[in-house]
Image (tube, grey):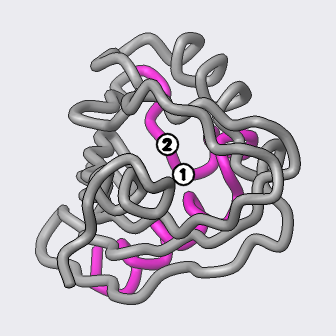
């Protein structure tokens, strides 16, 4: 597959959400590792259940952001992303053990690395700027 073809698969994965996984994910081999709040697992049912409980659209309104960079080589695609939104109901961050209060606008930034095989995503690793979230909530000192 060409670089543009594997980038397109990841774009469809990101745009479609986990509801449309069958088209772009190898469900029998998919694993999510090193992703905040998600178990390292091959169990697709666990991934789908978690995805439903951590859907940003459920907790945040006025969502904006998206992909800032997408770099691909061979079977890997690296995506730098940002998500900005205002909490419309309390959101408990999956790893930080803090709750984002209603009405608070936060920006989440991260990098996700996708591995593909046979035209489908088989692995996702996400690294999020958790300190940045804590700073925005006033729970960590900010550098001036």
| Residue at image point 50% right, 31% down | 98
Return the residue nearer the eye: 77 or 135.
135
Task: Find residue 105 and report its image quarter.
Answer: bottom right
Q: Which mark is residue 67?
A: none
Residue 92 position within the rendered picture, expressed as x and y whole percent measured from the top left: 60, 30
Q: Main secondary structure of the magenta part?
A: helix
Residue 131 position within the rendered picture, expressed as x and y whole percent measured from the top left: 27, 54
Secondary structure under tag 1 reads helix
- Asked if the magenta segment contains residue 6, the reply would be yes
Quadrant in the picture for the C terminus: bottom left
Q: Which mark is residue 24?
A: 1
Task: Find residue 113 and report its image quarter.
Answer: bottom left
> Can residue 96 be seen?
yes
Magenta segment boundaries in residue numbering: 1-28
Q: How many marks?
A: 2
| Residue at image point 66% right, 17% down | 49
Secondary structure under tag 2 reads loop
Residue 48 position within the rendered picture, expressed as x and y whole percent measured from the top left: 63, 23
- Asked if the magenta segment contains residue 57, the reply would be no
Return the residue nearer the eye: 46 or 56.
56
Return the residue nearer the eye: 43 or 130.
130
Task: Find residue 104 and report its image quarter.
Answer: bottom right
Tell me the crowding category of disc 2: few under 14, some 14 to 19, or many 20 or more residues within 10 angstroms, Cα based: many
Q: Are marks 2 and 1 in contact (CB under 8 Å)?
A: yes
| Residue at image point 25% right, 52% down | 127
Q: Which residue, as the protein is rendered here, is positioned at the far left?
A: 74
Residue picked out by circle 2: 25
Quadrant in the picture for the N terminus: bottom left
Marks 2/1: CA distance?
4 Å
In this rendering, would 62 be left or right of 3? Answer: right
């Amino acid at each position: 597959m060409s670089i543009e073809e594997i980038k397109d698969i990841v774009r469809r994965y990101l745009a479609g959400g986990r509801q449309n996984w069958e088209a772009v994910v190898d469900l029998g081999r998919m694993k999510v590792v090193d992703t905040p709040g998600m178990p390292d697992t091959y169990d697709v049912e666990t991934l789908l259940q978690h995805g439903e409980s951590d859907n940003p659209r459920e907790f945040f309104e006025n969502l904006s952001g998206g992909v800032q960079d997408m770099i691909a080589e061979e079977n890997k695609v690296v995506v730098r992303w940002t998500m900005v939104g205002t909490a419309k109901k309390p959101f408990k961050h999956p790893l930080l053990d803090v709750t984002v209060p209603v009405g608070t606008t936060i920006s989440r930034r991260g990098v996700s690395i996708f591995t593909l095989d046979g035209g489908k995503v088989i692995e996702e690793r996400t690294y999020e700027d958790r300190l940045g979230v804590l700073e925005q909530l006033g729970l960590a000192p900010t550098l001036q």
